[in-house]
Amino acid sequence: MPVSSAPALAVSGVTKHYGPRRVLDAVSFDVAPGERVALTGPSGSGKTTLLNCLGGVDRPDSGEIRLLGARIDQLDADGLNLLRRERVGTVFQFFHLLPTLSVAENIELPLQLLRVPAPERRERVATLLIRVGLAARAAALPSQLSGGEQQRVAIARALVHRPALLLADEPTGNLDSANGANILALLRELTDETGTALVLVTHSEEAAAICHRRVRLRDGRVVEASASSPA
């Protein structure tokens, strides 16, 4: 894991309510550049709500979230959209690939939104296709891929714009054990190579094991934060 004096992500006293229910209660933790952190805890503990706040999809009621020093929680809608395009990548359990676009086009889409020049787009996509083992499937549609292949495309798409933070919500939850293990190995290798910070929501012990640290939530509170040696 790269060593840095400044965190990539700093979460301080984040609280979130849905109506009268307090879903997050003064959550605080930091993530260093290149560090992988597993968010664990029982269903309903606030993991996905926290992930949504970290990605700017939802706003905390109080507290601070800083990405590379910038206050996510204070950005307006345009600022949040730009931040998500430039600085954040997301991997979902159910892939969320665009069905009418090819593998290469799905991966390229974030770069098009950022108006990256076409030659650079092609180079980045080609490099990632090789890295995730799908160069021969560049022209295929998502419906022609296995679940494991679709998740590899989703990971490449999430990393193609070189984000500072990668958010993953149960990325192996829809895969069999063999494909899940391959995806976890790929996430570990690529975040090591790119220095991207990873926050991984999971119920899976195997997924948590690739992380440097675990932050356990219960009833919206951090009840345990422990270091581990990635498997």
Image (cartoon, rainbow, N blue to C red):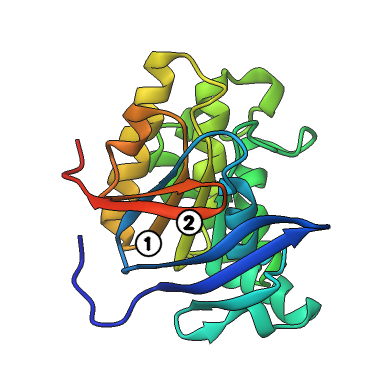
Residue appearing at x 61%, y 47% in the figure: 48
- Report whether 216 appears left or right of 64: left
Name above or below for residue 61 compared with residue 128: below
Q: Are marks 2 and 1 in contact (CB under 8 Å)?
A: yes
Q: Earlier in the sequence, mark 2 or mark 1?
A: 2
User: Residue 7 location, x and y as percent?
Assistant: 34, 76
Name above or below for residue 126 compared with residue 116: above
- Report whether 8 appears left or right of 66: left
Query: Residue 106 has which mark?
Result: none
The answer to whether residue 57 of the structure is visible from this angle is no
Residue at numbered disc 2: 166
Q: Nearer the viewer, residue 76 or 129?
A: 76
Q: Number of numbered discs present? A: 2
Residue projecting furthest to the front = 20
**Quarter residue 106 falls in:** top right
Residue appearing at x 56%, y 47% in the figure: 219
Residue projecting furthest to the right = 19
Q: Nearer the viewer, residue 80 or 48?
A: 48
Which residue type does callout 2 highlight? Leu
- Report whether 92 appears left or right of 178: right
Give the crowd class for mark 1: few <14, some 14-19, many >=20 residues within 10 Å: many
Residue appearing at x 51%, y 46% in the figure: 168
Residue at numbered disc 1: 196
Name above or below for residue 229 compared with residue 191: above
Image quarter where the N terminus lies is bottom left
